[in-house]
Amino acid sequence: MSENHDPIRLLDVRGMPLSLDEVHAAVGDDAAGGTTLFVGTVRDHDGGKAVTALEYSAHPTAVRELRRIAEKICADFPVRALAAVHRTGRLEIGDVAVIVAVSCPHRGEAFAASRRLIDDLKHEVPIWKHQVFADGEEEWVGAGSC
């Protein structure tokens, strides 16, 4: 593989179910000795309250912001390949909300880059979560607080 390849292989914010196989395939690289995958799912509680469902909304600039973050990760770590996808729309308990994956020459680098990627995505990409609680209350959580 050429040294001039773009390590950012897949970035998207989409309203359809996410595919772990698609993300894993996107980060395959013969020079990578470590690949990490993080899968975020909808849990049945938050802040001590039962959650029945949630809905994600994204600003039109979400993919552009995701690319900015991915470029920074690639500049700070020896990334061979990187992918990140986030779901929008109504999700049920157990549904996959986000998948990030990073391949690097070594596992430690892959873990560190992947951790930074998911943390920065959650804090900086304009995606909002509307939670519906079992008691009928609702809450919006946005980038920087989710």
Image: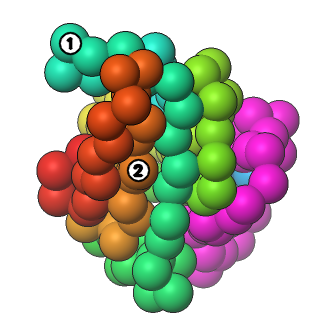
| Residue 130: mark in rendering | 2
Q: Provide residue 9's location: percent of width, then percent of height.
A: 67, 65
Q: Is residue 42 above or below residue 77?
A: above
> Which residues are the magenta region?
1-25
Q: Furthest residue to the front?
A: 136
Q: Label 1 is placed on what type of residue? A: Gly
Residue 11 highlighted magenta (yes or no): yes
Q: Provide residue 103's location: percent of width, then percent of height.
A: 55, 42
Q: Label 2 is placed on what type of residue? A: His
The quarter of the image holding the N terminus is bottom right
Q: In the rendered view, does 47 fall on the left or right side of 133? A: left
| Residue 48: mark in rendering | 1
Q: In the rendered view, does 20 fall on the left or right side of 79? A: right
Which type of secondary structure does the marked residue at label 2 adopt? strand
> From this viewpoint, is residue 40 visible?
yes
For the point 26% across and 61% down, the residue is: 143
Of pointers 2 and 1, the one earlier in the residue sequence: 1
Q: Provide residue 59's location: percent of width, then percent of height.
A: 45, 80
Q: Is residue 60 above or below residue 74?
A: below
Query: What separation in Å lies between label 2 and label 1 (alpha carbons)?
Result: 16 Å
For the point 35% across and 71% down, the residue is: 126
Asked if marks 2 and 1 touch (Cβ < 8 Å), the reply is: no
